[in-house]
Image (cartoon, rainbow, N blue to C red):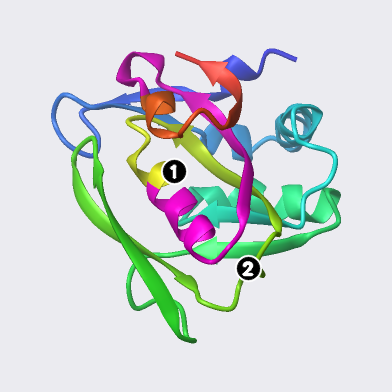
Amino acid sequence: MELEKYIRDIPDFPKPGVLFKDITPLLLDPGAMRETLGRLLEGAPKHIDKVVGMESRGFLFGMALAHELNCGFIPVRKPGKLPAKTIKQSFDLEYGSDILEIHEDAIKPGERILIHDDVLATGGTAEATGKLVEELGGEVVQYNFLIELQALNGRKRLNGKEVHVIFGY
């Protein structure tokens, strides 16, 4: 299946000069969703304790990965969105800065974690999420993405950890 045809370019979003890779058309097609999940699973490690998905598009396939890998799912969210006690990490984006939070009881020391998001751009969001996981004692086993914007060199911020990507642009 040619999954690339389900990813459309949106110029100047969220600001002028940014070419946004929109996965919405992929989400509209059940066959494309199944194929995408299959490709994400093909590259996933065999034993994972939890999948961490970043707000908000990391939740879409992150939940499905956790289900298929028979493990828990942890949402990482923007400030004030999680109800229990959290820890936080600030980071820079390709078009600004932000903060992410995770429940402080979400990960037990030594748990093997797969971090999932839709796009790897500059790596700031993924790096911040990895720091949160490690602060709680988890081991980042893999970073897992649908899309990598290769020219932005986001991998270099992920400390040499394994990275699995379906589409490279």
Q: Position of residue 41 (x, y in %)?
A: 78, 34
Quarter of the figure that contains the C terminus: top left
Q: Is residue 36 magenta?
A: no
The quarter of the picture where the N terminus appears is top right
Q: Is residue 88 left or right of residue 63?
A: left
Read off the residue under disc 2.
Answer: 107
The magenta segment is: 128-153
Q: Quadrant of residue 71?
A: bottom right
**SS category of the residue bearing label 1:** helix
Nearest the camera: 98 or 24? 98
Label 2: how many residues lie within 10 Å, few (<14), some (14-19) or many (20+)?
many
Horizontally, is 60 left or right of 101 in the view? Answer: right
Relative placement, left or right, of 34 versus 98 is right
Magenta region includes residue 138: yes
Residue 126, label in figure: 1
In front: label 2 or label 1: 2
The relative height of residue 112 versus residue 94 in the rendered view (above or below) is below
Q: Nearer the viewer, residue 72 or 139?
A: 139
Residues at marks 2 and 1, CA–CA distance in whole angstroms: 17 Å
Residue 25 image offset from top left, x and y in percent = 55, 33
Residue 102, position in %: x, y?
A: 47, 69
Residue type pointed to by label 1: Ala
Label 2 amino acid?
Answer: Ile
Please, what secondary structure does the residue beneath circle 2 have?
loop
Q: At which x and y percent is residue 160?
A: 51, 28
Task: Give me the residue at 83% from left, 46% from top.
Answer: 47
Q: Answer few, some or many: residues within 10 Å of disc 1's Cα (few below 14, many 20 plus, some between 14 and 19).
A: many
